[in-house]
Amino acid sequence: MSDKLKSLAWQRPLSKPIPLKPKPIKITPCLLWQVLPLVMRINRWSRKQRKLGRQPLFDLVRNTFLIVPDKGVPMGGLGGGTITRGCRGSFNRWAVKPGDYTYATVPADQFSVWVSRGNGPPQAVVLNPDSPDEKILQSWDWGLAEEKITYRALFPRAWHDYLDPLTGVNLSCRQISPVIPHNYQESSYPVCTFVWSIENRGQGDMDLALMFTFQNGMGVENDLAGGHSNYPLQMDTPQGKAVGLALRHRHRHPIPLVEGQKLADQAQYEDQLTFGIGALATEGVDVSYRSRFLTQSDGGAVWEDFSQDGCLANQADPTPSSEGSAIGGAVCARVQVPAGETREIVFALVWDMPIARFPDGIGWYRRYTRFFGRNGDAVPNLLTEALTKYPEWEAAIDEWQSPIMTNTDLPLWYRQMLFNETYYLVDGGTLWTDGREDFPSLEKNVLPEPEIGHFAYLESHEYRMYNTYDVHFYASFALAMLWPKLELSLQRDFAKALLVEDDELFTFFYTGDKGARKVRGVIPHDLGSPLEYPWLKINAYNSQDVSRWKDLNPKFVLQIARDYFLLKDKDFLDEVWPAVKQAIETMFKFDQDGDGMIENEGFPDQTYDAWSVKGVSAYTGGLWLACLQAGAALAEVMGEGQLAADYREQFDRAGKVYEEKLWNGEYYNYEASGGKHADSIMADQLAGHWYSMACGLDGVVPPDHARSVLEKIFELNVMGIKDGGMGAINGMRPDGRLDKTALQSQEIWTGATFGVAAAMLQAGLVDEAFKTTRGIYQVIYEDYGLWFQTPEAISAQGNVRAISYMRPLAIWAIQWELDGYAEKLKKAAS
């Protein structure tokens, strides 16, 4: 089946041009007047953070996340760190340390091929069309034409196909990581397998060798710090001998300063980090190695060793690197291939960083250490697993993907995008824990470690906050469907966090006002940042006062309802039920006139955090209705009939207000304030209705109203922008012009668009749903080259914001509807 799925995978010849180039955010003079104080406050705060040796939570000045169409399927499992091998063959994105991204290409990290036929001279070439910019590794044979390479991706696998890189040879490299739904062991492994298929299309037999070279490091300054060393490895397996190298890296972790300290006083942690590369020696496949070469040199020694005879000298040199130089290692596998036949060579890359260390010193053990130990000596066993167990992993991946990928009732582009957007569960700065190091100063804040561990992923590579809840609301369908135990763990953490208080004063960027970091009774915006210590210091977000947001508590109740009705885990519901009741009770304070409906307060008090809203609103009002409805359903399960009746009474009262104040005969107005843009058409206005239906409940607006709304959104918000070729823009005026009240009203949100498409499916608007979704595919995979770095937002003019973002995982909400989950839950409830 793997070959069948490869033929269905998203593919891109490297020579195919990218039609459009994404641009950074453009602030119009009108918007600049609105946001200038905000920008100034953020920049002052960012400068202060950098002086203390801390990375800012988000940085408007030093954005290092350059958008280049060279990304690919990330390697590794959930929570063990990740490395990306891009579509062009370079290793170019690194997140081994939690939440800390480096976008850097390391020239020495390559696969190269050598071929010898008969009496002719051997040939060799690096399997990458891009040669180094620096004056390094110039002895290597670069210059492979990009026309010879096609990239295919179907996460968690990818294929690099090389057509005739050397005369008479075809190569295909299949990249495999063990990301397997409902698998809570192998899915955590920090490993990747490369299975090379070699076809001899020439006239005679040939000898062929592949060399895998890898620098000890991640392309950062620490690679040159000295003290790194490489050692040979050899392990017996039932399939053959695993031969490779352990690259031990001295990973230094500076502890941020406090005010008044000097850089000279800065202390450091040094945590274990070891990379491993290797190949499987079997009958007919010989493996050799060279443990050390200087990667900043011309590379002549290692290239001459390889290119002469397709073998390396088995040279073991454990000499540590000196300060100012970087070292790498090489593993080579050689095989004879008769004319017209194919052979296979297997390589692997693994990494072992058992502790996820945060700036203030707190360390959490990663999930994979449960199976490989916490001592930093797991590379031999990780390599053995990667080189021998990949057939089992692929069989499981086939079983997962085949029913969807072979379903010709679904558009092929959708099937491809569904799996490829799942990349973010691995590449979202993801952390999956297996216990915390002792840290006496924080024992008062002990967070119990559940059996499944804690799970966290970032809002974005640029917005470094863990489990941002208003966004996870959309993205959570992926976890709920694929790794539901992790979804429940995350929800338990938020249930506990509801009761947390933190009196630390924040100055909120948006207003300049001060307020408490965390207020009791309110679901936090996030569970902390990798720049501090997640789970123990929550609410890293400081742009708005999230204790006054109107969507966080309702989103919590709705997700609890969905997850309970999906899994029927009564122990889970018993545990979180007090938090559910508290979350609902807290919301009544936002009903300013006692009519049952909450009101927004005239600032951006919900996930659209730069788009103000006042009074009763379509978005948060609908979420509140769905929250009451879900709360009543859960109260019935808990045997609290009177409470269920109270919630239903509030739902009925609030629903009448919602209809009276917002329904205009075609759609629900953005808000009921009577302001200049109050009657704008918000694409996401039915979020509450959509989620209610997804939970197996009855929805919160009449079905004919919902259909009318979605038809209007399709007409204006979708088809009004490039004939539907970009997705759904957030805000439109009734006359078909953009709502220009705010930056976010003029953006297309990739993940929110998927939520709108899911609602369209619920309303029977199938063609409209796929047309809407197709616009996002067009933007990401065709027009702008944004694959595997899907942004939060893009404007009609191609301005991109917040690349590699959590919310696009909401594509699984579409699959939720296609798989009939809502109907299944409804039947189960009845």
Image: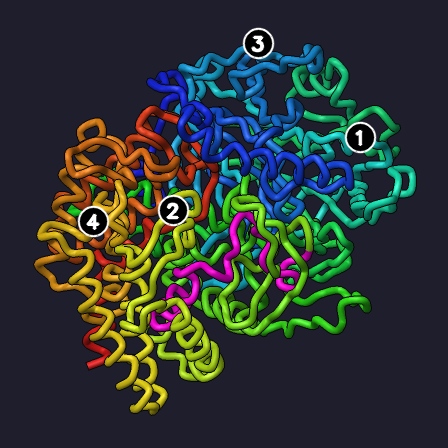
Q: Residues within 10 Å of mark 3 (few under 14, many from 20)?
A: few
At x 67%, y 46%, the residue is 97
> Is residue 682 highlighted in magenta?
no
The answer to which quarter of the image holds residue 563 is bottom left
Mark closest to the chain's N terminus, 1 or 4: 1
Q: Is residue 594 left or right of residue 786?
A: left
Q: Which residues are magenta?
A: 533-562
Judged from the image, the secondary structure of the residue bearing numbered disc 1 is: loop
State how far apart marks 4 and 2 are (Cα). Answer: 43 Å
For discs 3 and 2, the disc positioned in front in the rendered view:
2
Mark closest to the chain's N terminus, 2 or 1: 1
Residue type marked 1: Gln
Image location of residue 101, percent across then percent down = 61, 38
Q: Residues within 10 Å of mark 2 (few under 14, many from 20)?
A: some
**Compared to 146, does 100 lie above or below?**
below
Q: Nearer the viewer, residue 278 or 825?
A: 825
Residue highlighted by disc 4:
407
Mark closest to the chain's N terminus, 1 or 3: 3
Mark closest to the chain's N terminus, 3 or 4: 3
At x 21%, y 50%, the residue is 669
Judged from the image, the secondary structure of the residue bearing numbered disc 4 is: loop
Judged from the image, the secondary structure of the residue bearing numbered disc 2 is: loop
Image location of residue 454, percent across then percent down = 58, 65
At x 75%, y 39%, the residue is 247
For discs 1 and 3, the disc positioned in front in the rendered view:
1
Q: Which mark is residue 167?
A: none
